[in-house]
Amino acid sequence: MDSGYYAAMTGLVARTQALDTAAANLANAQTPGYRAEREFFRSVLLGPDALDSQLGKTVNNYGLLGGDRLSLAQGALEETGNPLDLAIEGQGFFMVQTPNGVRYTRDGSFHRAQNGQLATGADEPVLTAAGQPIAIPPGEVSVGADGVISVSGGTVAAVGVVAFPAGTELTPEGANRYVAPQGVKPVAASDAAVHQGALEAANQDVVQGSLNLIVMQRQAEMMQRALTVFHTEFNKFATEDLPKV
């Protein structure tokens, strides 16, 4: 079988998966703290015996998407004027307590809940680095670059900003929540600064995201047309040329 068929097939699969990723990135371009996902490639066949046959070598000349990885690039900081809105500059995540356990986010759109705790828009407690909720008494709130929260001049607590070892793959949960791999423990972020009265925008630009979506769509269409051409040629060979042999 012509190896061009393999190229078109793997290209179509890869571009279709990349198209889904580009669409998700664009859909969340206005979501605070959203981390865009970028595709990475792998061989079609895996394992020690993948290249033991001529077919395996032929197929593995072309790559398939191995999946998506989070882009940890910094998003733009946007001033909001809300003293409980917090943004992280640098590498790190806020910790929030959800019904499903601790989750990590870059979305710092917080408020003072009815029980007096610092909470997310869904009233989930924001945690300190030690994993404790943060009580915010009435008064003027000030948050330092180190995350220390003061109310009317008195220190209350420090919002937890944590990071993970290099290479840790966080799993997205919803638009801007992330789950750490089992057994991986975060540590206090060493190169992160907290900005009060601001939110971090998604690290996916709307214009670039729209362009990526169009490019992926055009490439997928091109691979589809190539597959159609190869399929037509194979049918012609099977019905017209092969009987003559």
Image (cartoon, rainbow, N blue to C red):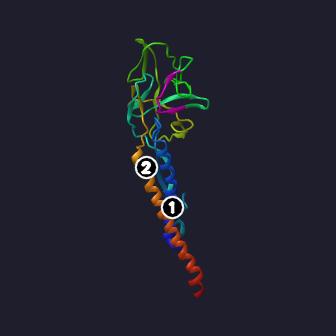
Q: Residue furthest bottom?
A: 244
- Residue 74: % across, % down: 39, 38
- Disc on res. 33: none
Total labels: the figure holds 2
Image quadrant holding the C terminus, namely bottom right
Which label belongs to residue 12? 1
Q: Image quarter for residue 143?
A: top left
* Residue type indicated by callout 1: Leu
Q: Residue at x 49, y 55 (%)?
A: 42
Residue 13 counted in the magenta span: no
**Residue 61 appears in the figure:** no
Q: Where residue 164 sits in the image (x, y, percent)?
A: 47, 35
Mark 2 and mark 1 residues within 8 Å of each other at the beta carbon: no
Image point 61% across, 32% down: which residue?
100
> Is the residue 122 above or below the residue 26 in the image?
above
**Viewer-proximal residue, 155 or 22?**
22
**Is disc 1 surrounded by few (<14), some (14 to 19) or many (20+) residues within 10 Å?**
many
Residue at label 2? 210
Q: Secondary structure at mark 1?
A: helix
Residue interval drawn in magenta: 103-112
Which of these two is toward me, 90 or 141? Answer: 141
Compared to residue 224, the image places residue 211 above or below, namely above
On the picture, is 116 further left or further right than 214? right
Foreground residue among 221 and 64? 221
Real-space Cα separation, disc 2 to disc 1, in angstroms: 20 Å
Judged from the image, the secondary structure of the residue bearing numbered disc 2 is: helix
**Dot 2 amino acid type:** Ser
